[in-house]
Protein backbone atom coordinates (compact mmCIF):
# COMPACT_ATOMS: atom_id res chain seq x y z
CA UNK A 1 0.00 0.00 0.00
CA UNK A 2 2.82 2.39 0.94
CA UNK A 3 4.52 1.62 -2.37
CA UNK A 4 1.40 2.64 -4.30
CA UNK A 5 1.08 5.83 -2.26
CA UNK A 6 4.74 6.64 -2.93
CA UNK A 7 4.33 6.01 -6.65
CA UNK A 8 1.21 8.16 -6.71
CA UNK A 9 3.05 11.01 -5.01
CA UNK A 10 5.96 10.70 -7.43
CA UNK A 11 3.52 10.81 -10.35
CA UNK A 12 1.77 13.82 -8.86
CA UNK A 13 5.05 15.68 -8.32
CA UNK A 14 6.17 14.82 -11.86
CA UNK A 15 2.87 16.17 -13.17
CA UNK A 16 3.33 19.39 -11.19
CA UNK A 17 6.88 19.73 -12.54
CA UNK A 18 5.63 19.25 -16.11
CA UNK A 19 2.90 21.84 -15.52
CA UNK A 20 5.50 24.31 -14.24
CA UNK A 21 7.70 23.64 -17.28
CA UNK A 22 4.69 24.20 -19.53
CA UNK A 23 4.35 27.70 -18.07
CA UNK A 24 7.97 28.63 -18.69
CA UNK A 25 8.81 30.61 -21.82
CA UNK A 26 10.53 28.80 -24.69
CA UNK A 27 11.95 32.03 -26.13
CA UNK A 28 14.97 31.93 -23.86
CA UNK A 29 18.39 31.59 -25.48
CA UNK A 30 19.78 29.26 -22.80
CA UNK A 31 16.75 27.00 -23.09
CA UNK A 32 16.97 26.91 -26.88
CA UNK A 33 20.68 26.06 -26.84
CA UNK A 34 20.03 23.16 -24.47
CA UNK A 35 17.26 21.88 -26.76
CA UNK A 36 19.47 22.17 -29.83
CA UNK A 37 22.02 19.89 -28.14
CA UNK A 38 19.41 17.25 -27.29
CA UNK A 39 19.29 14.12 -29.47
CA UNK A 40 16.36 13.08 -31.57
CA UNK A 41 15.73 9.32 -31.61
CA UNK A 42 14.38 9.36 -35.16
CA UNK A 43 13.57 11.95 -37.79
CA UNK A 44 12.32 10.54 -41.04
CA UNK A 45 10.01 12.38 -43.37
CA UNK A 46 9.23 11.53 -47.00
CA UNK A 47 8.51 14.34 -49.46
CA UNK A 48 8.17 17.26 -47.02
CA UNK A 49 8.17 20.94 -47.93
CA UNK A 50 10.20 23.63 -46.17
CA UNK A 51 7.26 24.73 -44.03
CA UNK A 52 6.30 21.14 -43.16
CA UNK A 53 9.86 20.29 -42.14
CA UNK A 54 10.08 23.40 -39.95
CA UNK A 55 6.81 22.47 -38.21
CA UNK A 56 7.92 18.87 -37.57
CA UNK A 57 11.33 19.93 -36.28
CA UNK A 58 9.74 22.58 -34.08
CA UNK A 59 7.43 20.00 -32.49
CA UNK A 60 10.06 17.26 -32.09
CA UNK A 61 12.83 19.57 -30.88
CA UNK A 62 10.57 21.66 -28.61
CA UNK A 63 11.86 24.91 -30.11
CA UNK A 64 10.16 27.67 -32.07
CA UNK A 65 11.27 27.79 -35.72
CA UNK A 66 10.37 30.86 -37.76
CA UNK A 67 10.80 30.71 -41.55
CA UNK A 68 11.40 34.13 -43.14
CA UNK A 69 8.90 33.51 -45.93
CA UNK A 70 9.48 36.75 -47.83
CA UNK A 71 13.26 36.25 -47.95
CA UNK A 72 12.98 32.65 -49.15
CA UNK A 73 10.43 33.47 -51.84
CA UNK A 74 12.68 36.32 -53.05
CA UNK A 75 15.53 33.77 -53.19
CA UNK A 76 13.55 31.54 -55.54
CA UNK A 77 12.30 28.96 -53.02
CA UNK A 78 8.85 27.46 -53.39
CA UNK A 79 7.52 27.11 -49.85
CA UNK A 80 4.60 24.86 -50.81
CA UNK A 81 6.45 22.53 -53.18
CA UNK A 82 10.03 21.29 -53.71
CA UNK A 83 9.54 18.14 -51.60
CA UNK A 84 12.59 16.24 -50.37
CA UNK A 85 13.27 13.15 -48.29
CA UNK A 86 14.94 13.73 -44.92
CA UNK A 87 16.19 10.89 -42.70
CA UNK A 88 18.24 11.09 -39.51
CA UNK A 89 18.62 9.07 -36.33
CA UNK A 90 20.35 9.67 -33.01
CA UNK A 91 21.63 13.14 -33.91
CA UNK A 92 21.10 16.48 -32.15
CA UNK A 93 18.33 18.88 -33.05
CA UNK A 94 21.03 21.31 -34.21
CA UNK A 95 22.50 18.80 -36.67
CA UNK A 96 19.03 17.79 -37.82
CA UNK A 97 18.23 21.42 -38.65
CA UNK A 98 21.56 21.72 -40.51
CA UNK A 99 20.86 18.60 -42.58
CA UNK A 100 17.30 19.67 -43.34
CA UNK A 101 18.42 23.13 -44.45
CA UNK A 102 21.13 21.63 -46.69
CA UNK A 103 18.63 19.28 -48.30
CA UNK A 104 16.54 22.25 -49.45
CA UNK A 105 19.32 24.68 -50.21
CA UNK A 106 19.59 26.40 -53.56
CA UNK A 107 23.27 27.30 -54.25
CA UNK A 108 22.17 30.60 -55.81
CA UNK A 109 20.49 31.65 -52.55
CA UNK A 110 22.11 29.78 -49.62
CA UNK A 111 20.06 29.33 -46.46
CA UNK A 112 21.18 30.33 -42.98
CA UNK A 113 19.63 29.94 -39.55
CA UNK A 114 20.32 31.68 -36.26
CA UNK A 115 18.80 31.89 -32.77
CA UNK A 116 17.39 35.35 -32.12
CA UNK A 117 15.26 36.25 -29.09
CA UNK A 118 14.98 32.56 -28.28
CA UNK A 119 13.61 31.63 -31.71
CA UNK A 120 15.32 29.70 -34.52
CA UNK A 121 14.99 31.96 -37.56
CA UNK A 122 15.62 30.56 -41.05
CA UNK A 123 16.34 32.96 -43.89
CA UNK A 124 18.67 33.41 -46.86
CA UNK A 125 22.30 34.40 -46.51
CA UNK A 126 21.63 37.53 -48.57
CA UNK A 127 18.82 38.70 -46.31
CA UNK A 128 20.02 38.19 -42.76
CA UNK A 129 18.46 41.09 -40.95
CA UNK A 130 18.55 39.58 -37.47
CA UNK A 131 18.32 42.83 -35.56
CA UNK A 132 15.19 43.13 -33.43
CA UNK A 133 12.37 45.27 -34.77
CA UNK A 134 13.16 48.82 -33.58
CA UNK A 135 10.88 50.42 -31.06
CA UNK A 136 9.71 53.94 -31.75
CA UNK A 137 11.76 56.75 -30.28
CA UNK A 138 10.22 58.57 -27.36
CA UNK A 139 9.16 58.01 -23.79
CA UNK A 140 6.42 55.49 -23.16
CA UNK A 141 5.13 53.33 -20.32
CA UNK A 142 6.34 49.77 -19.73
CA UNK A 143 3.51 48.17 -17.81
CA UNK A 144 3.06 45.03 -15.74
CA UNK A 145 1.29 43.29 -18.62
CA UNK A 146 4.60 42.99 -20.49
CA UNK A 147 6.95 41.71 -17.80
CA UNK A 148 9.27 38.89 -18.83
CA UNK A 149 7.43 36.22 -16.83
CA UNK A 150 4.21 36.68 -18.76
CA UNK A 151 3.88 33.99 -21.42
CA UNK A 152 1.51 33.55 -24.38
CA UNK A 153 0.66 29.85 -24.43
CA UNK A 154 0.17 29.61 -28.18
CA UNK A 155 0.19 31.75 -31.30
CA UNK A 156 -1.43 29.65 -34.01
CA UNK A 157 -2.19 31.70 -37.11
CA UNK A 158 -2.59 29.54 -40.20
CA UNK A 159 -3.53 31.90 -43.01
CA UNK A 160 -5.98 33.89 -40.89
CA UNK A 161 -6.85 37.50 -41.62
CA UNK A 162 -4.81 40.01 -39.65
CA UNK A 163 -8.00 41.35 -38.07
CA UNK A 164 -8.79 37.86 -36.73
CA UNK A 165 -5.20 37.37 -35.53
CA UNK A 166 -5.48 40.57 -33.52
CA UNK A 167 -8.70 39.32 -31.93
CA UNK A 168 -7.03 36.05 -30.95
CA UNK A 169 -4.18 37.96 -29.27
CA UNK A 170 -6.69 40.26 -27.60
CA UNK A 171 -8.42 37.20 -26.14
CA UNK A 172 -5.07 36.25 -24.55
CA UNK A 173 -4.83 39.61 -22.82
CA UNK A 174 -2.71 41.46 -25.40
CA UNK A 175 -3.88 44.98 -26.23
CA UNK A 176 -3.22 45.85 -29.88
CA UNK A 177 -3.80 49.04 -31.83
CA UNK A 178 -2.83 49.13 -35.50
CA UNK A 179 -2.79 52.47 -37.30
CA UNK A 180 -4.19 51.24 -40.59
CA UNK A 181 -3.97 54.63 -42.35
CA UNK A 182 -0.20 54.70 -41.84
CA UNK A 183 0.24 51.11 -43.07
CA UNK A 184 -1.92 51.56 -46.17
CA UNK A 185 1.06 52.67 -48.29
CA UNK A 186 2.75 49.35 -47.42
CA UNK A 187 -0.28 47.42 -48.72
CA UNK A 188 -1.06 46.19 -45.21
CA UNK A 189 -4.69 46.15 -44.13
CA UNK A 190 -7.13 44.18 -41.96
CA UNK A 191 -7.60 41.55 -44.67
CA UNK A 192 -3.93 40.58 -45.06
CA UNK A 193 -3.45 36.87 -44.38
CA UNK A 194 -0.87 35.84 -41.81
CA UNK A 195 0.72 32.51 -40.87
CA UNK A 196 2.68 32.33 -37.64
CA UNK A 197 3.06 29.43 -35.20
CA UNK A 198 4.76 29.99 -31.85
CA UNK A 199 4.58 28.19 -28.51
CA UNK A 200 5.11 29.64 -25.03
CA UNK A 201 6.63 32.97 -26.02
CA UNK A 202 6.67 36.31 -24.28
CA UNK A 203 4.63 39.18 -25.75
CA UNK A 204 7.65 41.04 -27.13
CA UNK A 205 8.81 38.00 -29.12
CA UNK A 206 5.34 37.42 -30.52
CA UNK A 207 4.96 41.06 -31.53
CA UNK A 208 8.38 41.31 -33.17
CA UNK A 209 7.79 38.22 -35.30
CA UNK A 210 4.23 39.28 -36.10
CA UNK A 211 5.57 42.58 -37.43
CA UNK A 212 8.33 40.83 -39.39
CA UNK A 213 5.74 38.54 -40.92
CA UNK A 214 3.66 41.54 -41.96
CA UNK A 215 6.37 43.60 -43.60
CA UNK A 216 9.28 41.25 -44.21
CA UNK A 217 12.72 41.51 -42.59
CA UNK A 218 13.33 45.01 -43.97
CA UNK A 219 9.81 46.40 -43.84
CA UNK A 220 9.08 49.86 -42.51
CA UNK A 221 6.92 48.77 -39.60
CA UNK A 222 7.59 49.36 -35.92
CA UNK A 223 5.85 49.53 -32.56
CA UNK A 224 5.73 51.28 -29.22
CA UNK A 225 4.03 50.43 -25.92
CA UNK A 226 1.66 53.13 -24.75
CA UNK A 227 -0.25 52.65 -21.49
CA UNK A 228 -0.64 48.87 -21.76
CA UNK A 229 -1.22 48.95 -25.54
CA UNK A 230 1.03 47.72 -28.36
CA UNK A 231 0.74 50.41 -31.03
CA UNK A 232 1.85 49.25 -34.51
CA UNK A 233 2.57 51.73 -37.29
CA UNK A 234 5.46 53.08 -39.37
CA UNK A 235 8.46 54.48 -37.45
CA UNK A 236 7.83 57.96 -38.84
CA UNK A 237 4.16 57.90 -37.93
CA UNK A 238 4.84 56.59 -34.42
CA UNK A 239 7.14 59.51 -33.68
CA UNK A 240 4.36 61.88 -34.75
CA UNK A 241 1.85 60.06 -32.56
CA UNK A 242 4.09 60.14 -29.50
CA UNK A 243 4.60 63.87 -30.02
CA UNK A 244 0.86 64.48 -30.27
CA UNK A 245 0.04 62.37 -27.22
CA UNK A 246 2.72 64.25 -25.31
CA UNK A 247 1.41 67.75 -25.96
CA UNK A 248 -2.22 66.77 -25.31
CA UNK A 249 -1.35 66.28 -21.64
CA UNK A 250 -0.68 70.01 -21.43
CA UNK A 251 -4.30 70.74 -22.37
CA UNK A 252 -5.74 69.55 -19.03
CA UNK A 253 -6.75 72.67 -17.12
CA UNK A 254 -7.86 71.42 -13.69
CA UNK A 255 -7.32 68.54 -11.27
CA UNK A 256 -10.87 67.20 -11.60
CA UNK A 257 -10.41 66.73 -15.34
CA UNK A 258 -6.94 65.22 -14.83
CA UNK A 259 -8.42 62.66 -12.42
CA UNK A 260 -11.16 61.74 -14.89
CA UNK A 261 -8.72 61.25 -17.75
CA UNK A 262 -6.56 59.03 -15.52
CA UNK A 263 -9.45 56.68 -14.70
CA UNK A 264 -8.90 53.14 -16.01
CA UNK A 265 -11.61 51.70 -18.26
CA UNK A 266 -12.19 47.94 -18.17
CA UNK A 267 -13.05 47.39 -21.83
CA UNK A 268 -13.19 49.80 -24.77
CA UNK A 269 -14.41 47.94 -27.86
CA UNK A 270 -15.78 49.45 -31.06
CA UNK A 271 -16.39 47.33 -34.14
CA UNK A 272 -17.19 49.66 -36.99
CA UNK A 273 -19.17 52.15 -34.94
CA UNK A 274 -19.74 55.73 -36.10
CA UNK A 275 -17.42 58.27 -34.48
CA UNK A 276 -20.31 60.43 -33.25
CA UNK A 277 -21.81 57.52 -31.32
CA UNK A 278 -18.43 56.11 -30.24
CA UNK A 279 -17.27 59.38 -28.65
CA UNK A 280 -20.58 59.60 -26.74
CA UNK A 281 -20.17 56.00 -25.57
CA UNK A 282 -16.66 56.79 -24.34
CA UNK A 283 -18.05 59.72 -22.35
CA UNK A 284 -20.68 57.49 -20.74
CA UNK A 285 -18.06 54.86 -19.83
CA UNK A 286 -16.03 57.51 -18.01
CA UNK A 287 -18.95 59.63 -16.74
CA UNK A 288 -17.51 62.59 -18.60
CA UNK A 289 -19.09 65.07 -21.01
CA UNK A 290 -17.69 64.93 -24.55
CA UNK A 291 -18.13 68.18 -26.48
CA UNK A 292 -17.18 67.90 -30.17
CA UNK A 293 -16.76 70.99 -32.33
CA UNK A 294 -18.14 69.34 -35.47
CA UNK A 295 -17.39 72.15 -37.96
CA UNK A 296 -13.76 72.18 -36.79
CA UNK A 297 -13.54 68.37 -36.79
CA UNK A 298 -14.91 68.31 -40.32
CA UNK A 299 -12.00 70.48 -41.43
CA UNK A 300 -9.75 67.56 -40.44
CA UNK A 301 -11.72 65.27 -42.76
CA UNK A 302 -13.64 63.58 -39.95
CA UNK A 303 -17.42 63.17 -40.10
CA UNK A 304 -19.93 61.94 -37.55
CA UNK A 305 -20.21 58.67 -39.47
CA UNK A 306 -16.45 58.04 -39.75
CA UNK A 307 -15.92 54.43 -38.67
CA UNK A 308 -14.17 53.51 -35.41
CA UNK A 309 -12.88 49.96 -34.89
CA UNK A 310 -10.43 49.02 -32.14
CA UNK A 311 -10.51 47.07 -28.88
CA UNK A 312 -8.42 47.56 -25.73
CA UNK A 313 -8.76 46.67 -22.07
CA UNK A 314 -7.59 48.24 -18.82
CA UNK A 315 -6.46 51.57 -20.27
CA UNK A 316 -6.84 55.12 -19.05
CA UNK A 317 -9.58 57.32 -20.52
CA UNK A 318 -6.88 59.60 -21.96
CA UNK A 319 -5.32 56.62 -23.79
CA UNK A 320 -8.66 55.45 -25.19
CA UNK A 321 -9.32 58.99 -26.38
CA UNK A 322 -5.85 59.29 -27.94
CA UNK A 323 -6.33 56.02 -29.84
CA UNK A 324 -9.82 56.97 -31.01
CA UNK A 325 -8.71 60.35 -32.36
CA UNK A 326 -5.71 58.74 -34.10
CA UNK A 327 -8.03 56.09 -35.58
CA UNK A 328 -10.33 58.65 -37.21
CA UNK A 329 -7.94 61.46 -38.15
CA UNK A 330 -4.46 60.03 -38.62
CA UNK A 331 -1.40 62.19 -37.96
CA UNK A 332 -1.48 64.75 -40.76
CA UNK A 333 -4.56 66.69 -39.64
CA UNK A 334 -4.60 65.94 -35.93
CA UNK A 335 -7.61 66.26 -33.71
CA UNK A 336 -6.96 67.96 -30.42
CA UNK A 337 -8.75 68.03 -27.10
CA UNK A 338 -8.77 70.16 -23.99
CA UNK A 339 -10.28 69.22 -20.64
CA UNK A 340 -11.89 71.51 -18.10
CA UNK A 341 -14.67 71.21 -15.52
CA UNK A 342 -15.31 67.52 -16.25
CA UNK A 343 -15.77 68.22 -19.97
CA UNK A 344 -13.53 67.14 -22.84
CA UNK A 345 -13.63 69.51 -25.82
CA UNK A 346 -12.59 67.94 -29.16
CA UNK A 347 -11.62 70.03 -32.19
CA UNK A 348 -9.04 70.20 -34.96
CA UNK A 349 -5.54 71.07 -33.82
CA UNK A 350 -4.64 74.57 -34.87
CA UNK A 351 -1.08 75.70 -35.31
CA UNK A 352 -0.30 78.55 -32.93
CA UNK A 353 -0.57 81.92 -34.59
CA UNK A 354 2.67 83.76 -35.11
CA UNK A 355 2.84 87.03 -33.19
CA UNK A 356 2.53 90.12 -35.33
CA UNK A 357 5.90 91.52 -36.36
CA UNK A 358 6.47 94.76 -34.55
CA UNK A 359 8.50 97.46 -36.32
CA UNK A 360 11.88 98.11 -34.80
CA UNK A 361 12.06 101.50 -33.16
CA UNK A 362 14.63 103.84 -34.72
CA UNK A 363 16.30 106.34 -32.45
CA UNK A 364 16.15 109.84 -33.92
CA UNK A 365 19.47 111.18 -35.01
CA UNK A 366 20.86 114.23 -33.26
CA UNK A 367 20.99 117.19 -35.66
CA UNK A 368 24.46 118.41 -36.40
CA UNK A 369 25.61 121.95 -37.15
CA UNK A 370 22.63 123.53 -35.37
CA UNK A 371 23.12 126.35 -32.92
CA UNK A 372 21.14 125.23 -29.77
CA UNK A 373 21.30 128.76 -28.40
Image (cartoon, helix red, strand yellow):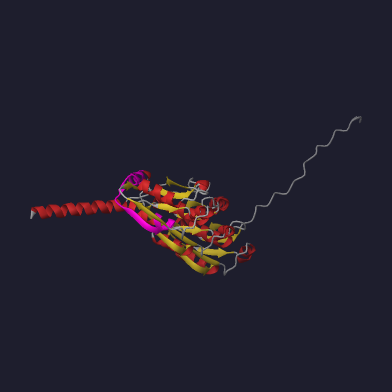
Q: Identify the residue at image location x=40%, y=58%.
A: 48
Q: Identify the residue at image location x=40%, y=47%.
A: 98
- Left or right for 293, reference 285: right
Q: Position of residue 236 (x, y in %)?
A: 58, 51
The residue lying furthest to the left in this view is: 1
Question: What is the number of callouts on the image?
Answer: 0
Q: Position of residue 44 (x, y in %)?
A: 34, 55
- Asked if residue 138 shows in the view, the reply is no
Query: Which quadrant, please, contains the N terminus?
Result: bottom left
Along the viewing direction, whichever of 348 and 66 lies nearer the viewer: 66
Along the viewing direction, whichever of 349 and 362 lies nearer the viewer: 349
Query: Is 76 within the magenta?
Result: no
Residue 85, image quadrant:
bottom left
Q: Is residue 93 above or below residue 298?
A: above
- Asked if residue 217 shows in the view, the reply is yes
Residues in magenta, as a range: 30-54
- Left or right for 175, reference 251: left
Q: Position of residue 360 (x, y in %)?
A: 77, 41
Along the viewing direction, whichever of 368 and 113 lies nearer the viewer: 113
Q: Identify the residue at image location x=43%, y=62%.
A: 158
Q: Position of residue 345 (x, y in %)?
A: 56, 61
Query: Which quadrant, please, contains the C terminus?
Result: top right
Amino acid sequence: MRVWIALALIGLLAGVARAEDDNKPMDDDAYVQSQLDAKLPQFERDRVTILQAAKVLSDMGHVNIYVENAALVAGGYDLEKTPVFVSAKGITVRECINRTVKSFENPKAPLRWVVESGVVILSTAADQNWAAIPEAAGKYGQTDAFKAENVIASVDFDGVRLEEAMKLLHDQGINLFVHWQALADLQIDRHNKITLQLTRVRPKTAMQLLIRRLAGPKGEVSYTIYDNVWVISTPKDLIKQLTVWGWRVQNIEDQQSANKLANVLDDVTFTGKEFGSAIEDLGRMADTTMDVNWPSVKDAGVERDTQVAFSVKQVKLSTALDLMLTEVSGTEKQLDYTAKDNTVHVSMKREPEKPATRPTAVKPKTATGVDKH
